[in-house]
Image (tube, rainbow, N blue to C red):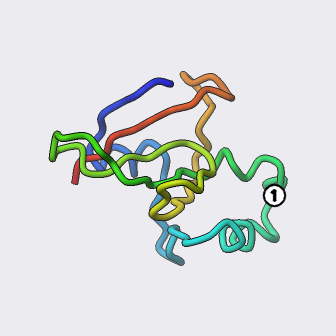
Amino acid sequence: MSAADLSFEEFEEKYDTSSEEEELTFDNITEVFEHFKGTDIDREDVYRYVWTSVSNDDPDPEKSVRYINGFYIVDKLKYIVCETPWGTEDQEANKSIDIFVSK
């Protein structure tokens, strides 16, 4: 699993997690799939547009939030949907990625 440290702004810019039309954070998987209904994204590819925010046990207060690519249930705080899928460009498609996001 690779890990990276990003500011929230860097994470948001890299994966395009902001939307003027709607909130892109969800509490459960059903809401995530509802968000993608009627889009060009195949159901089996939805996970590549999702990050799971999990509780972070890192003692460094700068690493206040941890995002893991894909769907996770244990220690989940919320799901974040992005417009830019992970697993493209410089990343391997099925590689696990941890990102520590500082606020």
With 51 as the anchor, is 100 left or right in this view? left
**Pointer 1: residues within 10 angstroms few (<14), some, or many (20+)?**
few
Relative vertical location of residue 34 with respect to residue 9 in this rendering, above or below: below
Amino acid identity at mark 1? Asp
Residue 87 vertical placement versus 23 (above, below)? above
Residue drawn at x 54%, y 61% as measured from the top left: 79
At x 22% / y 54%, what residue is drawn?
Answer: 103
Please say if 86 is above or below 54. above
Could you tell me residue 80's position as x and y percent?
51, 59
Residue 85 location (% of width, % of height): 62, 43
Q: Residue at 45% x, 55% y: name it.
A: 53
The residue at which mark 1 appears reads as 40
As rendered, which of 30 and 9 lies closer to the eye?
30
Tag 1 secondary structure: loop
Residue 37 vertical placement versus 59 (above, below): below
Query: Which x, y percent locates residue 15?
Result: 49, 46
Q: State the count of labels.
A: 1
Name the residue located 53 percent from the left edge and 77 percent from the top edge. 22
List x then y, in percent, for residue 13. 40, 47
Going by the image, does 67 lie left or right of 50? left
